[in-house]
Image (cartoon, rainbow, N blue to C red):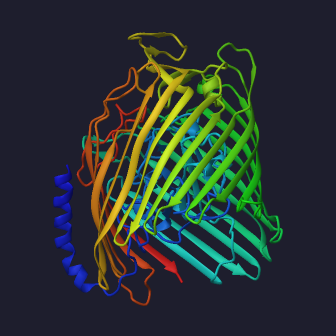
C-alpha cells in the first residue's frame, strides 16, 4: 500500500514540473495555509502560525497553545470537500470519521464516539436537532454555510457540557457578526457540479458595514440524485436542501449585541429503506458581549438560541409515517476575569438547556414525549508555571432531569448530577517542539433514547428498549500530544486512553422483531432487537499527521504529507464495542503557488474485523482524491476554478460505524467542477 502511495507521489511530481516553471509567486508555504486547499488536504495544524481557535478556550487561543490538539477547517477546504454534511468536511482529519447512514444524515464520530458523546454546535450554541435520537436523522447545519469548523478535545470541552466526552464540533458561520468588517461590503458566490449523482450546489454570502452595524446574509441550495456505487445505483440515496440566514450586530466601544434568524430545509432518502425525510428548522440566535474594563471583571458574554425543529418520515406514495418535533432553548453566559494571583486567565460560566421532544405517527411508540432540562456551572483557568510550561484546567457540575415513559408505560422522572474536571499541561521544549498531557474525568447523564426507547424505528430498522435505571457514565481519559514545527517539517499527533465506568451502548441481541415487538431468533420481522446496557469499557488509540516541504521556491511549494489514525474499543466482558471505525493511513503530495494548486492523497482504510456481537465485518479499500485549482486573473485573484476527483479508485466502501452498512455502499467515483468568486 505504501509503495502505491510513493509511486503516485512520484508520478504527480513529474506532472507538476511544468507548473513549477509557469507559476509566478508563492502565496502559501504550508498545506494548511493555502489559498485553496487541495483534495484530501489535512486540517490546519502545527504547520500553521497565528491561527486562532475560539472553541478550545474562552481567550481565543492560538491553535498551537492548547495541551490537547485542536483542529480548524477553513471555508476553502469545506467548499472543495463538497458533501451534504459537516462530517464530509472533516473526512481527512485524523481521529474523525462519520456515521455514514445517508447522504443527508451523517454525523461526526470522534475517536470511535458519536451521538451523545460528541457535541455539535453552531457558533457555540446547540444544533438543537434529533440526530442523537436516530442515525437516519440529519444535522440541520449545512457545510455550504460554514466559514470555519473547529474540533476541540481536552479541558475546553467542559464549557459545552458532558455530552462532549469525545469532543466538540463547532461550526462557525458569522451569521451573528462578531466584529465590524474591514470592507463596506464584501461577498462570495460559489457553484459546483458533481458527475456521480448529478449534484448541483450553489451558495452565496454578503457582509456589509453600515456605521456601527455589521450585517450578514447567506443562502445555499443543493440538489443531488441517487448516487452510483461500484456495484450500481444506490436506491433512495438522493438529497435536496436549501436554506439561509439574516443577521446583524451593533457595536459600541469594545461591546456588541447581535441576533440572527436561520432557516434550514432538507428532503433526503434513506438508502436502506423506502422512506424519505422532510426536515425543517427555524432557529433564532443571539450573541452579545459587554466590555467591563481591564480590571478583574473584563468581559461578559451571552450566547443563546431557540430552535423549532420538525421532520416527517414519508413513504414513496406521500403517506407520513411519523412526525418528529424538537423545541429547544440553549443559553450560555460567561464572565472573563483578569489575572488572579498565579492564574493568568479565568472564566466562569453557566448554561441552561430546555428541550421538549415528541413524535406523532407509526413510529411514535419508539420514543414517547420527553422533556430534558439541565442547569450547569463551570470554570476554566490557565496558569503559567514557567516561561515554557503552562497549565490549563476546567471543572463543571450539572443537574440534568429527563422525564419520559419507558416500556413499562409508567411515566418516569430521572435526575442526575454529573461532575467533571480536566487538567492539561503544555511544555514548550524548544522553538520547534511542544508536548502536551491532559487528564480528564467526565460524567455524562444518560440521554432520553438510552433511558426511554421502547419500540421500532424503521429508519435504522431497529427495535430498541431503553433502561430508566441507567447510571451516570464516567470517562477517565489520559492523552499525550506532540507537535513538531521545524523548518520544512511539521508533525502533530496524539496517543490516548479512555477508561469508561458504566459505559452505555446499544447491544444487538441477534433476534429479529416485528412492529408489535414480537422477537425471536430467525423471526419474520425486519427490525433488529437492541437493548441499551451498561458495563465498563476501554477506548485507546493513536492519530497524527505530518508534512514536509520538499521544494519551496518563489515559483511554488511542493509538499509531501501523511496521516493516520487507529482506535480500539473493548467492553469489560472482552467483547468489542459495536460500530467502531477501522484504522486509516494515507499519504500524498501538494503543489501550491499563486495561480495553481494541485494535489493528491491516497488513503487506505483497513478491514474491520473487531465488530460487535451480531454485527458484520467491513472490507478494506483504497480512496484516492485529486485536485487542480486555477486562478487565471492576476487582477482578480479571488476568482478560482477547480476540478476535484473523489474516490477515483472506485473501490467498494462500506461504513463500519453504520447500522445499515450491509445494505448501503458509499458513492463511487465522482468528479466535481467548482467555481468560486469572492469580492473584493
Q: Which residue is drawn at 59% across and 79% down?
A: 186
Say left or right for 152 vs 35: right
Answer whether residue 71 is visible to the viewer in this image.
yes
Q: Which residue is drawn at 63% across and 75% down?
A: 207
Instruction: Find residue 216 and report its horizontal and vertical position in percent.
Output: 66, 70
Say left or right for 252 vs 231: right
Image quadrant where residue 195 sits? bottom left
Instruction: Find residue 168 and report its horizontal and vertical position in percent.
Output: 57, 49
Q: Single out the residue that lies furthest toward the front.
A: 386
Quadrant into which the C terminus falls: bottom right
Instruction: Find residue 150 and report its horizontal and vertical position in percent.
Output: 54, 57
535 over 607 or under it: above or below: above
Q: Which residue occupies the foreground of this view, 108 or 565? A: 565
Answer whether residue 141 is visible to the viewer in this image.
no
Q: Which residue occupies the foreground of this view, 362 or 606? A: 606
Q: Which residue occupies the foreground of this view, 526 or 584? A: 584
Say left or right for 304 vs 165: right
Q: Which residue is drawn at 70% across and 48% down?
A: 307
Instruction: Find residue 83 and report its horizontal and vertical position in percent.
Output: 43, 54
356 over 367 or under it: above or below: below
Image quadrant where residue 486 sits? bottom left
Q: Which residue occupies the foreground of this view, 315 or 338? A: 338
377 over 359 or under it: above or below: below
Q: How many labels does the image show?
A: 0
Amino acid at each position: 500500500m505504501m509503495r502505491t502511495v510513493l509511486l503516485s507521489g512520484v508520478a504527480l511530481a513529474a506532472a507538476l514540473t511544468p507548473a513549477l516553471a509557469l507559476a509566478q509567486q508563492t502565496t502559501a508555504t504550508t498545506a494548511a495555509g493555502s489559498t485553496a486547499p487541495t483534495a484530501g488536504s489535512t486540517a490546519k495544524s502545527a504547520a500553521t502560525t497565528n491561527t486562532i481557535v475560539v472553541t478550545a478556550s474562552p481567550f481565543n487561543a492560538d491553535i498551537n497553545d492548547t495541551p490537547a490538539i485542536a483542529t480548524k477547517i477553513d471555508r476553502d477546504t469545506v467548499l472543495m470537500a463538497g458533501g451534504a454534511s459537516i462530517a464530509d468536511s472533516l473526512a481527512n482529519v485524523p481521529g474523525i470519521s462519520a456515521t455514514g447512514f445517508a447522504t443527508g444524515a451523517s454525523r461526526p464520530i470522534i475517536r470511535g464516539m458519536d451521538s451523545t458523546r460528541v457535541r455539535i454546535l453552531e457558533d457555540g450554541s446547540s444544533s438543537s436537532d434529533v440526530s442523537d435520537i436516530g442515525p437516519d436523522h440529519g444535522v440541520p447545519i449545512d457545510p455550504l454555510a460554514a466559514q470555519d469548523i473547529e474540533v476541540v478535545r481536552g479541558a475546553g470541552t467542559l464549557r459545552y457540557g458532558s455530552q462532549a466526552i469525545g469532543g466538540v464540533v463547532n461550526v462557525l458561520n458569522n451569521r451573528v457578526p462578531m466584529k465590524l468588517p474591514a470592507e463596506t461590503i464584501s461577498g462570495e458566490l460559489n457553484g459546483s457540479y458533481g458527475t456521480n449523482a448529478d449534484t448541483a450546489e450553489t451558495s452565496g454570502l454578503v457582509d456589509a458595514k453600515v456605521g456601527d452595524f455589521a450585517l450578514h446574509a447567506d443562502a445555499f441550495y443543493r440538489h443531488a440524485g441517487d448516487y452510483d456505487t461500484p456495484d450500481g445505483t444506490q436506491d433512495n440515496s438522493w438529497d435536496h436542501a436549501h436554506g439561509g440566514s439574516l443577521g446583524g450586530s451593533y457595536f459600541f466601544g469594545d461591546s456588541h449585541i447581535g441576533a440572527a434568524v436561520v432557516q434550514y430545509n432538507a428532503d433526503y432518502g434513506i438508502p436502506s429503506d423506502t422512506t424519505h425525510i422532510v426536515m425543517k428548522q427555524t432557529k433564532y440566535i443571539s450573541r452579545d458581549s459587554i466590555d467591563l474594563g481591564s480590571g478583574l471583571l473584563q468581559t461578559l458574554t451571552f450566547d443563546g438560541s431557540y430552535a423549532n425543529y420538525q421532520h416527517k418520515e414519508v413513504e414513496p406514495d406521500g403517506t407520513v409515517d411519523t412526525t418528529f418535533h424538537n423545541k429547544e432553548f440553549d443559553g450560555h453566559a460567561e464572565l472573563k476575569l483578569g489575572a488572579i494571583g498565579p492564574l493568568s486567565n479565568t472564566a466562569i460560566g453557566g448554561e441552561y438547556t430546555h428541550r421538549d421532544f415528541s413524535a406523532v405517527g407509526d413510529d411514535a411508540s419508539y420514543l414517547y414525549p420527553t422533556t430534558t432540562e439541565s442547569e450547569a456551572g463551570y470554570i476554566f483557568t490557565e496558569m503559567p508555571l514557567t516561561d515554557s510550561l503552562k497549565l490549563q484546567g476546567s471543572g463543571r457540575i450539572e443537574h440534568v432531569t429527563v422525564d419520559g415513559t419507558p416500556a413499562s408505560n409508567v411515566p418516569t422522572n430521572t435526575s442526575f448530577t454529573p461532575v467533571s474536571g480536566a487538567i492539561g499541561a503544555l511544555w514548550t521544549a524548544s522553538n520547534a517542539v511542544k508536548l502536551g498531557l491532559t487528564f480528564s474525568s467526565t460524567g455524562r447523564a444518560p440521554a432520553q433514547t438510552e433511558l426511554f426507547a421502547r419500540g421500532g424505528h424503521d429508519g435504522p430498522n431497529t427495535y430498541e428498549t431503553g433502561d430508566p435505571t441507567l447510571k451516570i457514565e464516567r470517562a477517565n481519559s489520559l492523552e499525550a500530544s506532540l507537535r513538531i514545527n521545524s523548518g520544512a517539517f511539521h508533525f502533530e499527533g496524539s496517543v490516548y486512553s479512555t477508561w469508561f465506568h458504566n459505559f452505555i451502548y446499544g447491544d444487538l441481541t441477534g433476534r429479529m422483531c416485528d412492529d408489535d415487538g414480537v422477537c425471536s431468533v430467525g423471526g419474520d420481522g425486519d427490525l433488529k432487537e437492541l437493548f441499551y446496557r451498561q458495563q465498563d469499557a476501554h477506548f485507546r488509540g493513536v492519530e497524527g499527521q505530518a508534512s514536509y516541504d520538499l521544494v519551496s521556491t518563489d515559483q511554488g511549494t511542493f509538499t509531501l504529507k501523511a496521516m493516520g489514525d487507529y482506535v480500539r474499543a473493548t467492553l469489560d466482558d472482552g467483547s468489542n464495542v459495536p460500530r467502531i471505525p477501522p484504522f486509516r493511513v494515507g499519504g500524498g503530495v501538494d503543489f501550491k503557488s499563486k495561480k495553481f494548486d494541485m494535489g493528491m492523497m491516497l488513503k487506505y482504510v483497513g478491514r474491520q474485523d473487531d465488530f460487535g456481537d451480531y454485527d458484520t465485518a467491513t472490507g478494506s479499500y483504497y480512496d484516492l482524491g485529486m485536485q487542480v485549482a486555477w486562478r487565471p486573473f492576476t487582477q482578480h485573484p479571488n476568482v478560482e476554478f477547480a476540478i476535484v476527483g473523489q474516490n477515483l479508485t472506485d473501490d467498494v466502501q462500506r461504513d463500519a460505524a453504520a447500522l445499515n452498512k450491509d445494505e448501503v455502499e458509499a458513492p463511487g467515483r465522482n468528479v466535481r467542477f467548482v467555481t468560486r468568486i469572492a469580492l473584493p
